[in-house]
Image (tube, rainbow, N blue to C red):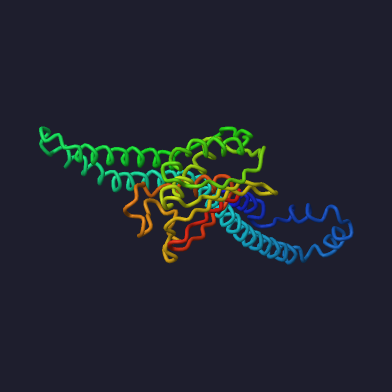
Amino acid sequence: TLGSLLYQANTVRFGGEVSSNELQDLVQESPAVAEYLEDQKDYEAHFITIANLTKEDQQRALGQALTITTAIVLVFVGFISFIIARYLLKPVEEAYASQERFMQDAAHELRNPLAAIDIALSTRAEDKDPELIDIIKRQNNRLVGIVEDLLFLERRRIGEEVPITNISTLMEDVLEDLRPSMNNKKLKLNREIQPEIMMRIDPTDFVQLAKNVLDNALKYSRHGKSIKVSLSTNGKTILMVKDQGIGIPQDELKQIGDRFFRASNAADRPGTGLGVAIVNKILNSYGGTLEIDSQIDKGTTVKMII
């Protein structure tokens, strides 16, 4: 629009034929040229023709320049508009994809325990079968676990200030909470917790991080074996959990962390298949990385680097 207005304005300025008076006005600031034109008064029509040709050439050149400039401006503005639009729409697209993924995951995974509970409840109530009640409790607990894990995965924290937390103390608390489970399996705990490690991390996030990895170590460890837990910092904070459990098949390691994926040798163990996905989400939000090394029947080492 601006280029069009400039072109129209200059078309008016350069439009029309040059008159004798306009020719005199053009040479007023040059006395020598004015005197020459006066001497050549008989050839005034010739000079007017030359002036008109010059004027037409200037108008044509201006039109081309304005056309090229307008095209460049339009391309630049279009490119900038595209970049801004993509930037503004990215959070919307991410939110939509996240919501869609949540609905698909929930519909798929919640259907199985609900169906199992429905079948169990359809059995005659007068049977009062203890095994039936146990099935209902297990499926209900699994259902609750899936819902809680999915809600955590979809949690959004916008504009919240992250506190500085003593993660050494939190780590000790997590280990203390898990002590009864370790005692039940007669597991030996080897701990190397560096004291007073301060980190800018939400306490809930760190507890989730530690508990999810330790829960897996407990779940897949054999009775009487040991679990090693270390927490240290030297520029980067490293939380490592090493167990002597059943291990993970090498060809499935890349899939560990996918939602609801469970290793082929872990199908008979309780779990939602969301634990490592939660660990990945937390680590990503703090710029961390996850490393997993595992061997069948020898155990798994999980290293979290923040």
Residue for point 39% across, 38% down: 148
Which residue lies most toward the right here? 32
| Above/below status of 117 relative to 243 | above
x and y, in percent, of residue 75 in the image: 56, 57
Q: Count every numbered label the image shows and give the total.
A: 0
| Above/below status of 171 relative to 85 | above
| Above/below status of 291 relative to 141 | below
State the residue in front, 271 or 146: 271
Residue for point 51% across, 60% down: 293
The answer, for residue 277, to whether it is visible in the render is: no
State the residue in front, 29 or 272: 272
x and y, in percent, of residue 164 in the image: 64, 34
State the residue in front, 136 or 84: 136
| Above/below status of 91 relative to 51 | above
x and y, in percent, of residue 62 in the image: 66, 59
Residue for point 32% across, 38% down: 141
x and y, in percent, of residue 19 in the image: 70, 55
Q: Is residue 211 left or right of residue 48?
A: left
Q: Quadrant of residue 129?
A: top left
The answer, for residue 37, to whether it is visible in the render is: yes
